[in-house]
Amino acid sequence: MKKNYLKEEVMFKKVNCVLLVDDDNVSVFLSEKFIRSLDITHEIKIAPNGEMALKYLLECSSFGEPFPELILLDISMPVMDAFDFLQAYGNMNSDTIPKIAIAILTTSSNPRDIERLTNFGIVDYINKPLTHEKLIHFMEKHFNEDDE
Amino acid sequence: MTIPSKIKILLVDDREDNLFSIQAVLEKDGYEFRQATSGRQALKILLVEMDFTLILMDVMMPNMNGLQTAFMIYQRERLKHIPIIFITAYDNAEMNAFHGYQAGAVDYIYKPINPDLLRAKVSVFVELYRKNHQLMEQEEKLLQINNELEEHVRKRTEELYNKNRELEYKNNELTKVNNDLDNFIYTASHDLMSPVINIEGLLTVLYKEFDIPNEEFRRLKDLTLLSAERLKNTIKDLTEISKVQKGGDDDIETVRFKNLLDETEHSIMGIIEKNKARIISDFDIKEIRFSRKNIRSIFYNLLSNAVKYSSPLRLPIIHVSTRKYHEYIVLSIRDNGMGMNEQSLGKIFEMFKRLHDHVEGTGIGLYIVKRIMENNDGKIEVESKLNEGTTFNLYFKNNPKSNEKELLKRGSYV
């Protein structure tokens, strides 16, 4: 039943690149699997924490590579968590780093976390585990082809 | 100090025959005597012996007369309490000077001495002396009792103080342990959540990619997914509890009951429509100062319970009302649902206690509501009749501690 989604006409734009920022291997494995099977992007980049994600964005900027169009961000990570990453990303020069849609992947919607994150202009929250339904819903909401 | 068995009297006269005759008169009454033939000798005796009850002294003496001697005697602090009876042939104005000195303790007797009068006068002073000593003894006893009492009180106070200190210490320890426990629950539930979510995700992928059209397999699949779901919900509840435990009085504001009810109805619209429930409100008290998050949790839990546990025999009608009761604002939520027997009533506030298995729930809602009420000096009461309905009465302290805290906080900024 769930596989039917793939055969149906889905109404979202395929993006160039998704950056997945998460330290949990299993979680990354699952997210990657759903993203690939839904074919929402040409490329998936993975960063194990906020610092590596920042590094990747800076590399895109310096080597003139295309930036990811969507960042899926886990909240709690070692080295640099979501809050610190968002802070640093917000401080970056907007001429060199474009505004990227950022969605938070959470295990629980802790209202305090949500409140803190709201200030960073997050586009949406997706409760883990990622599923086809959630991903399609999200893509249709934020990457609707009709919008273009 | 005890009453001396002997009454000692000092006789002072320059003529020995006088001394002899006075002693002879008074001896019948069993006193003890010392004799001095001059003021000087009297003073000498008084240097060594100070325990005289009375001094009988002739006024007319060579060298140092009686009045001069008396003056010398009374200059010594330790002799001031000894009364003197002057023996004189005539009135002497100087004698009166001693009245001011030692009120009532100075008297005189005229020559020639009337033996009966002498005995009477002496006995008055002796009696006075005895009474005085009795009083002094009693006073001493009282003082001792007083001291004992004071000592007793001091010891008890010290004991109480120590006990208090001990309690304070234990209280601090408990608070610390409690905090540790809260942190533990919070961290543990968070750390448990990720792997459970991963398992759920992995199972979903597994069943999608390796689906076997077999009854036994379908059953196993459903049960594993259900187990993962249950584990997830339990961990979610643990997180909820630790949130309540953490106090959560940082979002205290004036909350309108009507708004709360609207919000809650909106969030449980699904089950309200499914059960065709009707909610009637009557808010005598319009608003309350409380943590918005906490009171929202209270409304959500109690209202969704009232709708969920409705009777299959009738459509659910739920009355929500507020009123004032002494120092409390009382929130009542009354339903016409399934109700409970007494045995069940005793259990509903326990953690993870579920009374029905046909209705979804994890058994944490009422526990959380009770914790919130107790943390804010309030209470929750429940009345229920099986097959008739249930009423929850929540007593909110009109001026909860948190208000004071907030005022204090504000005050410090002024």
Image (cartoon, rainbow, N blue to C red):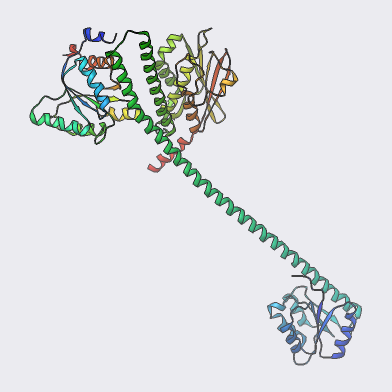
Across and down, in percent, residue B109 comes to 85, 80
* Residue found at x 40% / y 29%: B239
Residue at x-position 45% and y-position 29%? B289
For the N terminus of chain A, which image quadrant?
A: top left
Which quadrant of the rendered structure holds the C terminus of chain A? top left
Say if B283 sits above or below B100 in the image.
above
Furthest residue toward bottom: B63
Q: As displayed, is residue B196 above or below residue B6?
A: above
Tell me: residue B309, above or below residue B84. above
- In depth, the one of A96 and B186 nearer the eye is B186
> Which residue is at 88% across, 80% downward?
B26
* x, y percent for residue B77: 68, 77
Residue B122, position as x, y percentages in the image: 85, 76
**Count of marks overlaid on the render:** 0
Residue B396 location in percent, x, y?
Answer: 51, 29
Give the quadrant of residue A11.
Answer: top left
Q: Is residue A108 visible?
A: no
In this rendering, position of residue B151 left or right of residue B413: right
The answer to which of A25 and B214 lies nearer the viewer is: B214
Q: Can residue A133 be seen from the camera position used here? A: yes
Q: In this orientation, which residue lies closer to the viewer: B302 or A5?
A: A5
Depth check, front residue: B34 or B287:
B34
